[in-house]
Amino acid sequence: MVVGDVATAVEVIVLGAGLAACSAALRAAQLGRDVVLVNPNPLGGYYLYESGLPSKLLLTAARRAWQVRHSEWLGLNVDDYSLDYAVMQRWKAEMIAAHRQAIERQLDRHGVAVTQGKGWFINASEMRVEGEYGALKFIFEQAIIATGVKPTPLDALPFDNEHILTPAQALNLEHLPPSIAIIGADTIAVELATLFAKLDVPTDLIVPTGHRLLADFDPTVGQLIEKQLKQQGVKINHDMTIPQGFTLEADKVVVWVGIEPYTNGLHLESAGVATDERGFIPVNDRMQTNRPHIYAAGDVTGGPPLAALAQKQGRIAAEASAGWPVQYAPQAIPRVAWTDPEVASVGLAATQAQALGYEVVAAQLPIDAVPNPMMFDSPDGLALIVAEQESQILLGVTLVCPHAGELIGEAALAIEMGATLTDLAETVHPYPGLNQVLQQAAEAALDK
């Protein structure tokens, strides 16, 4: 008998190791389902190892290093400053390992069977998995695909793990490079530029032709953050073309110009699962593919590559597969860039709201209008607030200030609950608290 001929029956099989996959597997197990999680990689996926958490950890350390060196205005002078990047990297690795272990404990406690190996569809009800201990075969009732994405290479600058790097490879460098160039314009590219600039690495940010800096946010944000990056020493080049034979003098070059799904090798065609022209898997509001018993969640579906969305989609897929009457329909999706100062937004910008036919009232508040000491280190921030003119229902908020990523949660809740400008303005916020920026922005929109 050949290993793998005998099939194991399972209710739900989950493909992936990231936040969407782990959330789906955990939620399905909580609902009493028999669950197998299949992936060749360690649990945690893209967020834990490649960009999300590693960049945030290193940015936290880099900010502290920057503050140590640039606090003369507070009367703090440091003469004997040194930076040990190896220790910084070791701390990052320890934090990631602790987070992975927490995920493993959660899955184990709820009875999720984790099978390490590469899985693919034999047909619409069977899957083959090949790993360290040979081949296995599963017969499943339902499947959830959450295999994530990977960075798209440039034809002129293919990744070589030596000179041309992915963001993950850049974040895992053992030593700070003599210089670095980052090709890209979105959150990850700008965060990387912020990180290396704050660690005193000569940094170039190259914005390719057809791209706008932080285009996912209000245009004012990109202009403000560009000013801040230049003050931190970043050289920014706009509308650069990257032809074949293009070269850069920087010691390391990071390319982040797009993503593509991890669907190659899954044999989706054998299961009859449809993909779009880019290879992403379209789903409905219950996270179902064109095969109703096969679901997909997270970045592989082609939506915004946000960790919070991946987790939510994984839970929705698990609950839908269990027959729950759920749907994926978030009203407010926060976005955060860990620049300095941070950028966060939720809902619609004024131009987006007007394009959708809304009559809007909007206000812009300079961040130094809020008397909080935390603001004094980043005086060039702002708050933008947008509401429907007649009803005053909140439509969107954008913040550029310290801890914007934490503050935006209140705005997201307000939008989800259908709050008005008056609701936000009349809610008493602690004084002098950072979150007063939301109250004062609402008051400004109300002309108070």
Image (cartoon, rainbow, N blue to C red):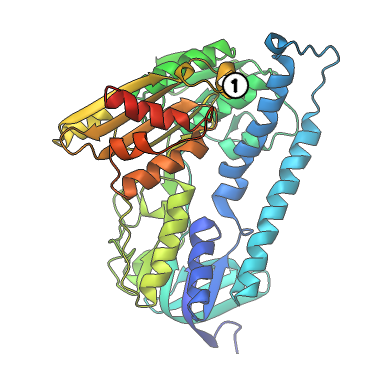
The residue shown at (19%, 30%) is 360
Q: Is residue 27 left or right of residue 68?
A: left
Q: What residue lies at 34% left-to-right and 63% top-to-bottom?
A: 287
Which image quadrant for residue 1? bottom right
Instruction: Name the quadrant of the C terminus.
Output: top left
Q: Is residue 267 visible?
A: no
Residue found at x 34% / y 57%: 281
Give how far across and how far down residue 158 sits, in percent. Answer: 52, 34
Q: Quadrant of residue 233?
A: top right
The residue under label 1 is: 373
Q: Residue at x 53, y 85 (%)?
A: 8
> Is 92 left or right of 210, judged from the image as shown?
right
Callout 1 environment at 10 Å: few (<14), some (14 to 19), or many (20+)? few
The x and y percentages for residue 46 are 55, 49
Q: Is residue 74 visible?
A: yes
Nearest the camera: 118 or 213?
A: 213
Q: Look at label 1 and name its amino acid.
A: Pro
Position of 29 with respect to 428 (left or right) is: right
Q: Position of residue 65 (x, y in %)?
A: 72, 24
Q: Secondary structure at mark 1?
A: helix
Residue 116 in the figure: left or right of residue 125: right
